[in-house]
Image (cartoon, coloured by chain):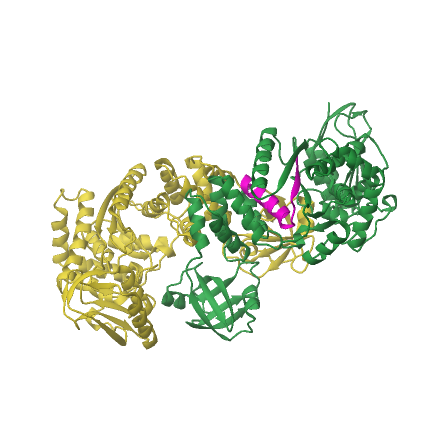
Chain colours: A yellow, B green
Amino acid sequence: MEFKIKKINVRTGGILIALMHVRDADLYDIYSMDRVKIKKGKKNIVVTVDITTSSKLVKPGEIGLFHESFSILGAKGNEKVEVEITKKPSSIHFIKKKLSGGRLNEKEMYSIIKDITEGVLSDIEITYFVSGCYIHELSLKETVALTKAMINNGEILKLKKKVVVDKHCIGGVAGNRTTPIVVSILAAAGITIPKTSSRSITSAAGTADTVEVFCKVSFSIKKMKQIVNKTNGCFVWGGGLNLAPSDDKIIKVEHPVSLDPVGQLIASILAKKRSVSATHVLIDIPVGRDAKIEKMKNALRLKKKFKEVGKAIGLKVKVYITDGSQPIGNGIGPILEAREVINILKNKSKDRYHDMFRRKCLHIAGDLIELTGKTKKGKGYMYAKNILESGKAYTKFKEIVKAQEGKVRDPDNMRLGRFRYHFYAPKDGKVTFISNRTINRLAKIAGAPHDKEAGLYLHVHKNSKVKKGDKLFCLYSDSKQRLEFARKEYKSWGGIEIK
Amino acid sequence: MEFKIKKINVRTGGILIALMHVRDADLYDIYSMDRVKIKKGKKNIVVTVDITTSSKLVKPGEIGLFHESFSILGAKGNEKVEVEITKKPSSIHFIKKKLSGGRLNEKEMYSIIKDITEGVLSDIEITYFVSGCYIHELSLKETVALTKAMINNGEILKLKKKVVVDKHCIGGVAGNRTTPIVVSILAAAGITIPKTSSRSITSAAGTADTVEVFCKVSFSIKKMKQIVNKTNGCFVWGGGLNLAPSDDKIIKVEHPVSLDPVGQLIASILAKKRSVSATHVLIDIPVGRDAKIEKMKNALRLKKKFKEVGKAIGLKVKVYITDGSQPIGNGIGPILEAREVINILKNKSKDRYHDMFRRKCLHIAGDLIELTGKTKKGKGYMYAKNILESGKAYTKFKEIVKAQEGKVRDPDNMRLGRFRYHFYAPKDGKVTFISNRTINRLAKIAGAPHDKEAGLYLHVHKNSKVKKGDKLFCLYSDSKQRLEFARKEYKSWGGIEIK
């Protein structure tokens, strides 16, 4: 059937929609949310139909196209196009199968993830998929199929290396900026580590936000490959790449009901690792009150699944369960974390907490070195320590930063927020709890991660002994208003317990 | 926190959305799809937040409101408003409970349906609810709770009558316009029957479309009550009222995956009956190939549930399983069906199929009369027949049409489509199948129900003996193009089988 294109200059935000008049819909037996294929010359797209009873937007004989659709078709408006009714995509049948308790094979999972990636499935349809996966938990086979489908529906960084390592932290812990140090040690050891990182979601800064203090983090896959081939490592913002892109759309529909099905979590993490050609991966699962994983039982369950799925897709996975009961390191916020990273790389010891943080980095780096077989079991830590203490890791860090078009600056010369506010101990005692959630929130209120200079410096950690009036932490911001808001919020929440 | 309203002159189509800049979202810990309460003077609304990183739409300090929201608040733009973060509505916890296999009590179900009705829940959240109800099928208790929640979250037609009857047909059968006749007989018998009807969805005409040939069908609850109090009956379009309004939003998210959970189907039908104060209800379930219900087993299962739920909410329900294997009556389309209704009311017998249709009407009317106790069992049919044959039903029909501001016209003077096309038997034999789906589609292609004069007249029914070249049916339309399209479609589908 022939229609005339009517351009509607509105973006729908991903999904491809066409508007049709009710008289045409009745004529051709089309219902709201059905799909049609629009052909214009050699180009064609499948769009979801929305039906209108008013002739103001489209008249009978016209098909209204929103921005995304007419830009794909290269339409100018008023052209005649051929419109064909298409069957429901078969991915919908597979979603229904999963919803009804069936098991999905690789082909079916691939079809669903492909259609999510390409904007063929609507939020409602993706929600049915997530519901099915939540209620009928993904089996090992299905999780593997999902992981593979995510890998194969995104870009892949191909590296001609036998061993490629990567790491991932489940998150939720403030500070904890181990990645720049681990990458520098591994790359200095001659091991390829093409690290992609996220920006902050709930935390005060992600690795991408922190490294951005020194250099660019947004690169294409092609440019990333050049950096890795040159330096063995990189710190690239993953959100700017197209690795396993279905993930974001799935997470979007999970948020309103706070779902986080285990199968999807594992598939999404491991797919992104496999997409950069990783062969050996370390997963850091911090466990503790106010961390993302609060119970050891759940961490162990996750550990088992990570290893199983990793094995099935040819990844050697080591899972490292760590203490997530308090922030790691003293600085929280991009510059404050960057400063700490540089101090460790320059082997400047600051205090006990700084050293704990340093040891965690060495454990992760050491475990990864052992995992690749470069050293024997039990020798990785010392190997990593030697690289760090020799200054080779710092040299490597500077090299990567340079390859990312930046320059390492002296942390002591970096400007922190113009305004600062100290928080003091209200009584004598021992610090028994520091909430990751509170610390992250305060740093975000101060302006992190958008304002690189905003954040928080912790003067105490768990088990610190304090006297009334001792400094607990200092908040930095360029906005007095934000500091004042943070002060009030801390007063109402608390977050540091002294007993 | 204080924000300045920025008006965004776009409709979102129901759900209340506000746009916020990412800097404010970070400051106040608000994530996409979280909810905030906006207070302006004495008015306040809860809206779902969408977050933007561009300052083009809203700047930090501004809150962008779409048409639905600023019209509720009576906002002009640029006013300062107080914005408060609200917790997730508790309905979301109940949805998650159902999704996880829990059972919902009356209070929980009420909360979900209330929030669906008021636009508090998004399509994604409603989809999780439907998924939960689909996978963990609603128990009798839950179905009853859902029915009550639907009734209590819509308008109610209060009638001061001890006995109020109603009927409903599950649908899918072409023709089958029993309602105008049944209502006329019942109302003439002195029984109150406040009938609301739908317009066509997949069929060529709904009762509302057919009665509209003679009079208005769109009235307020108040006006509907006046009509019923005056005449005992009415034919009002249900879509124009506000009875169980959550239903439409639930059906919208069910369509893409073709879900139709039994619990929801029953709740939606019975809620609408109870909302017009019905006490005695007859449900017509046509069963047959190409009808909505194709298998007797499913019809019997539905019958049992209808009776159970009806009993629990104080409705006497009679379920009548009928032959749905072919169209009922000869005329398909608004005027063609209206003509047949008038002929039956005027006791003009046309042919065998016309008489079969008439008998079905009398059975339904008779059963309803018996159900109310007005006659003994087995005497209802004759009672209804006497009313019909006495002319009282026709008088009553004219009376109701007059109350609905219209006038009954002579069907023989009604204009049918200017163009007509006959379809002929391709060979000698017996008609073994007439597809409801095909017949409805052809009438819709011809222009029904929008074009009242469009439709189809059947010259044969199942078991008719035909000779090659005999008329099978005639299609009427005001558009030659539509007729031509219908002809081609019929050629490719078939739909009438002769053996």
Place of residue B45 in the rendered image (x, y in percent of width and height, measured from the top left): 50, 65
Place of residue A454 in the rendered image (x, y in percent of width and height, measured from the top left): 29, 70
Front-lying residue, B11 or B145: B145
Would residue B274 be counted in the magenta stretch? yes
Q: Residue at x 17, y 63 (%)?
A: A499
- Left or right: B137, with B430 as reference point: left
Point out the image quarter for the N terminus of chain B: bottom left
- Left or right: A114, with B281 as reference point: left
Place of residue B247 in the rendered image (x, y in percent of width and height, measured from the top left): 58, 49
Place of residue B261 in the rendered image (x, y in percent of width and height, measured from the top left): 54, 40
Point out the image quarter for the C terminus of chain B: top right
The answer to whether one can see residue A44 in this image is no
**Quarter of the image where one finds residue A370:** top left
Would residue B57 be counted in the magenta stretch? no
**Quarter of the image where one finds residue A463:** bottom left
- Left or right: A156, with B402 as reference point: left
The answer to whether one can see residue B375 in this image is yes
Front-lying residue, B301 or A419: B301
Q: Residue at x 59, y 37 (%)?
A: B307
Count the marks.
0
Front-lying residue, B224 or A98: B224
- Left or right: B381, with A299 as reference point: right
Front-lying residue, A223 or A185: A185
- Which stretch did the figure color magenta? B258-285
